[in-house]
Image (tube, rainbow, N blue to C red):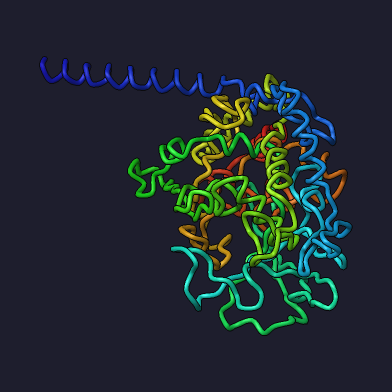
């Protein structure tokens, strides 16, 4: 009798646990993620959806700063002179921020005759890093190939792109095709050392960046599990990068490998590296910088105060079914749906309940996505979880241009992006492969609703 009673008690206890988990599951699935940017979300599903200021940015002075920053974001530095000289270059990839981040969204995988939207990061194994773990610049080139130059200065070389195709089959017999980029550097102006590491990058979206910046480092650290202590196969970790303002290693948040700690440093790096525009964060010797602290600050403020559009059709049964599949196959373990921001100097960004679908952590994505180029703590196969908010409006914002996904734009569809997942995401990819065609389409409909 005691044994039977003990067994009944154990069964009862497990039933309570099951009921509790079931309740939590229903609550999680019933969560309304429409206000992806919290109170700052905008109700806009047009081609200009990524260009709106925070909905709660009501201070007239802040609205003016946002507008002034937008001018800086669109400023063509090929037409800007300082003390009689051009501020652009002399080596560069593009002429303005907006030329790469079209409509404040993702850019194209493109190398052009006059300017390029994509960039190729480079580094070498030889030499001493400026800071622990930092990429080592290639002599005469730096950390990025600048494929355009102003005479008499030559560009680092011309960049060309080829695609290597592969094929596979879902468990239901449906076939698919994937592509992998092969970057070629032609007509290099300087001989690159043997072992130079290359990494193709397409421009990431800009909108919502201020809300991501407002996420506390402690919150990001609380989601990290570098030793996989819970044995779920997910071991996200932070990238510790050099923070020029704090003169210390801090948690990285921006860039495909979370290699920048703040929007100020991210924007200043883009000015300096992508356009050759010196600034107070990245000056050049004793020469006055090409842009002032005020101009830099206004551009940063503009990026910080770009809103996230609301998610759409969240009460639709198909969208909800797709969201359940998203959770069931494990996508939400890294693409975390809900985070509360911390305190930020811009009050409208503080303490917002947002739905970015990222943990901002580095994850091992497998050898298929490895770029062979470490960046501070981030190893070759590690990438920051990409935020998914607004992803369903990408095609509309790009006005018919080809939308691509992942760090190098190899994925032409969201479906291809999922199929490239490996490493810590291998189990989720395998589960995706086993879904029926209808379940896969419902998952895609959910993603397109974000």
Residue drawn 82% across and 58% down? 95
Percent coordinates x, y for residue 178 in the rendering: 69, 58
- Left or right? Give the position of 5 relative to 180: left
Where 91 falls versus 107 (above or below)?
below
Residue drawn 65% across and 65% down? 286
Q: In which quadrant of the rendered image does the C terminus lie?
A: top right
Percent coordinates x, y for residue 42 in the rendering: 74, 25
Q: In which quadrant of the rendered image does the N terminus lie?
A: top left
Answer with the quarter of the image where residue 434 lies. top right
Residue drawn 69% across and 60% down? 272
Percent coordinates x, y for residue 55 in the rendering: 72, 23
- Left or right? Give the position of 318 relative to 212: right
- Left or right? Give the position of 115 relative to 406: right
The reply to whether residue 178 is visible in this rendering is: no
The reply to whether residue 4 is visible in this rendering is: yes
Nearer to the camera, 363 or 296: 296
């Amino acid at each position: 009798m005691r044994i039977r009673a003990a067994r009944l008690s154990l069964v009862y206890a497990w039933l309570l646990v099951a009921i509790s988990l079931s309740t939590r599951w229903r609550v999680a699935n019933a969560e309304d993620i429409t206000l992806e940017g919290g109170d700052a979300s905008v109700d806009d599903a047009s081609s200009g959806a990524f260009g709106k200021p925070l909905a709660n940015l009501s201070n007239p002075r802040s609205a003016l700063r946002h507008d002034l920053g937008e001018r800086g974001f669109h400023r063509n530095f090929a037409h800007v002179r300082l003390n009689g000289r051009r501020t652009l270059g002399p080596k560069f990839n593009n002429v303005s921020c907006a030329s790469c981040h079209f409509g404040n969204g993702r850019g194209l995988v493109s190398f052009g005759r006059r300017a390029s939207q994509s960039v190729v990061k480079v580094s070498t194994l030889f030499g001493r890093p400026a800071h622990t773990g930092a990429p080592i610049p290639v002599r005469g080139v730096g950390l990025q190939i600048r494929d355009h130059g102003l005479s008499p200065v030559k560009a680092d070389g011309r960049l060309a792109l080829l695609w290597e195709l592969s094929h596979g089959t879902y468990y239901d017999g449906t076939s698919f095709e994937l592509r992998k980029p092969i970057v070629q550097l032609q007509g290099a102006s300087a001989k690159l050392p043997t072992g130079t590491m290359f990494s193709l990058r397409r421009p990431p979206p800009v909108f919502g960046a201020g809300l991501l910046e407002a996420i506390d480092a402690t919150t990001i650290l609380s989601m990290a599990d570098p030793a996989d202590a819970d044995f779920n196969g997910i071991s996200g970790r932070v990238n510790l990068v050099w923070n020029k303002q704090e003169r210390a290693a801090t948690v990285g948040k921006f860039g495909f490998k979370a290699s920048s700690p703040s929007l100020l440093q991210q924007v200043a790096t883009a000015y300096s590296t992508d356009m050759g525009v010196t600034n107070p964060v990245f000056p050049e010797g004793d020469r006055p910088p090409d842009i002032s602290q005020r101009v830099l600050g206004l551009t940063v403020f503009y990026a910080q105060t770009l809103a996230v559009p609301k998610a759409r059709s969240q009460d639709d049964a198909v969208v909800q079914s797709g969201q359940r599949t998203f959770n069931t196959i494990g996508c939400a373990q890294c693409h975390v749906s809900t985070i509360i921001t911390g305190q930020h100097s811009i009050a409208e960004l503080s303490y917002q309940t947002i739905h970015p679908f990222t943990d901002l952590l580095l994850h091992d994505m497998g050898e298929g996505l490895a770029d062979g180029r470490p960046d501070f703590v981030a190893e070759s196969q590690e990438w920051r979880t990409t935020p998914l908010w607004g992803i369903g409006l990408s095609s509309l914002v790009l006005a018919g241009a080809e939308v691509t996904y992942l760090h190098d734009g190899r994925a032409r569809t969201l479906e291809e992006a999922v199929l490239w997942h490996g490493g810590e995401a291998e189990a989720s990819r395998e589960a995706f492969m086993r879904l029926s065609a209808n379940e896969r389409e419902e998952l895609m409909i959910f993603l397109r609703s974000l």
